[in-house]
Every structure is written in structure tokens, then in C-alpha cells.
Amino acid sequence: MENDPFAVSDYRGRFAPSPTGPLHFGSLVAAVGSYADAKFHHGKWLVRIEDVDVQRTVPGAARHILDTLEKLGMEWDEDVIYQNRRYKIYQEALEVLNQQGLLYPCTCSRREIADSSITGLYGFIYPGTCLNKPASTKNAHALRIQTPDEMIQFQDILKGFYAQRLRRDIGDFVLRRADGIYAYQLAVVVDDAAQNITHVVRGADLLDSTPRQIFLQRLLGYATPHYMHLPVVTNAAGEKLSKQTNAAPIDTANALRELVAALRFLGQEPPAEILDGDISSFWRWAIQNWQVNRIPNGCDRKP
Ligand code: GLU
Ligand code: ZN
């Protein structure tokens, strides 16, 4: 431990679920990975409810997720924050970006974007239609940010070197939708900074969002945290577990088994007898024996 470069008590990690349904095994893996890594480094672990998109939020889901985390013995160190109470803060950040002359209104429909864009590795690359031919702001419009051509790169703790050129690979992206909803990319950056997060541990489905987030951090004058992207859990059809793919909720009547399965998915090798103990003996073992170098960092896989 003494020689571990990350063994610092100012470690601040977080788990940031979207309350679109109950916790499932995929989100449990992110929770367990972020919790074990934070506690191994004697750090703090925070929980943030990412309910910025009210249309996707399911009433009662946030409470259900928090109850489940409690039953699994995962205690957060500071008050939970809720994105739907923070719109003013996102608007302020948007204004800072606007003062830099980087935002522009966009009135393109999904259809227009689909018809005019090329498809990149991560979806449609917006061709800048409304940048070149400014849209009227009288009607509902989204706000996009102009992306730079230069390479944005970082070193992921598990995945290693990762880089994108946002203009080429992603295109100008939306920070506030036409219905007024702030985009995940903006809210996550503002909140990771507001909570002084030093280590972001989350699923690798968000790896390709990270350069966009680093870009926004730089413009807003925020520090960039360390990133560790965990393998994503897929179902038998190879799809990421999610509400959309009907992932089963975590069974809190079998809390210990669920935790052990998540820990094993992360490549850790608890002894079989861990199942004879209880939740606190589980966590004692999981934290003391946490080894990042055992986490598989290759393809996404089934549990
Ligand atoms: N709210 C996002 C999700 O549930 C996670 C965001 C993050 O960890 O940055 O997929
Ligand atoms: Zn447009």
C-alpha cells in the first residue's frame, strides 16, 4: 500500500446511476468496482442520482436504487445529489461556454440529421448545418458546442491510451436539448467537478464519452479526474444489460451472492467460503484484496 501511487486519502470516487429502473447486475458491477476501488484507497465514495433527463426518470427508482445499495452494505460518505435540482448550475456552465463563443443554436430534426450526416464509430457526426447557416432562435432549438480538430487523449487506468479528434469522430454535440433538458455530457462534467471527484470508475460503454468530457472540463477550467472504465456486462444476445434489454433487478434477498458474482465478474478471486460470511465480512475481504490488475480489460462479456 505504501508504494501505491494512488494511496492518497484525497481520493473521491462516485457512483452515478440514472434512475430509469431498479439496479441490475450491470449497474451493480459499476457500483461494486467504484466502491471497492475508493475504499481500497481510503477514499470517499459518493452517490449522485443522474435524473437530469426527466423523461427517462422512473418515479421511485432513485429511492429503490439507494435502498438496494444500503442493503448491499454500500455506504455513501456525503449527501446524495440529484441532478434535477441543479439546472441553475448547468445553465451557469452553459453561459460560461457561450461567452467563449462556442455555442450555437440548432433546429435540425432527427430526420434532417440522419439524412445529412455521415455515421462515425459512435453514431451520426453532425455536419455543422446550423453553424454554417445560423438557425433562428425564435423557436425551440438545441444548443450545440463547436468541437476542435485537435486530438484529445487520456490514459485510462484499465484500457490504457485512448484518443479522439472530436470534430472528426463525434462532431459538434448537444449541451441543451430543444426541450430544455441539459445533456448528460454537460451535467456529468459540472457535477464531477462540483463534487471534487478525483477518480471516475464506470462502465466502458462511457469510454467514448470521456474525450467530450475532458474537452468541456478544459473549457470550464476544471481538473480532469483519473478514469477507469470497467468491462460491461452483456446478456446472452451480447447486448449491454439495461432497462431496455430487460435486465433483471438485483435480488436483495440474495445480497451476498449478488455481491460475490459482481466481484468475480471484476476478476477478483474471493474464496468459496466468502459465502459463509455476511455482508460486512464480504466487504472486508473485497476491499483488502482489491486488485485492479485482475480486472479483465478486454471485450465485454457475460457474467
Ligand atoms: N448515469 C450514467 C449511467 O447510468 C453513468 C454516468 C457516469 O458514470 O458518468 O449510465
Ligand atoms: Zn442544426
Image (spheres, grey):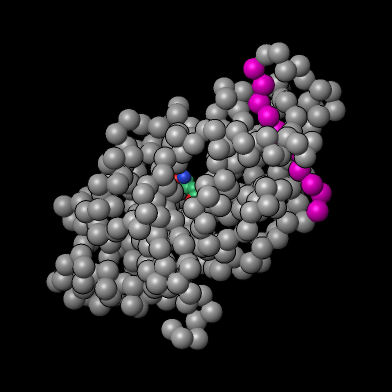
Q: Quadrant of the C terminus?
A: bottom left
Q: Position of residue 102 (x, y in %)?
A: 77, 37
Quadrant (top left, top right, bottom left, bottom right) of the N terminus: bottom left
Which residue is rendered at x = 81% and y = 49% of the image? 149
**Outermost residue toward the top?**
138
Residue 282 against residue 113 in the figure, above or below: below
Q: Which residues are magenta?
A: 140-150
Q: Nearer the viewer, residue 273 or 292?
A: 292
Residue 145 part of the magenta segment = yes
277 vs 244: above or below = below
In the image, residue 45 lies at what x, y percent?
39, 60
The image position of residue 163, as x and y in percent, is 70, 59
Closer to us: 100 or 280: 100
Q: Is residue 133 visible?
A: yes
Task: Give the image quarter of residue 265.
Answer: bottom left
In the image, residue 40 sits, relative to residue 124, either above or below, namely below
Q: Is residue 159 magenta?
A: no
Q: Is any part of residue 206 visible from this angle?
A: no
- Left or right: 16 with respect to 168? left
Q: Is residue 298 left or right of residue 30?
A: right
Q: Position of residue 279 (x, y in %)?
A: 20, 65
What residue is at 33 percent from the left and 77 percent from the top?
288
- Residue farthest bottom in this picture: 3
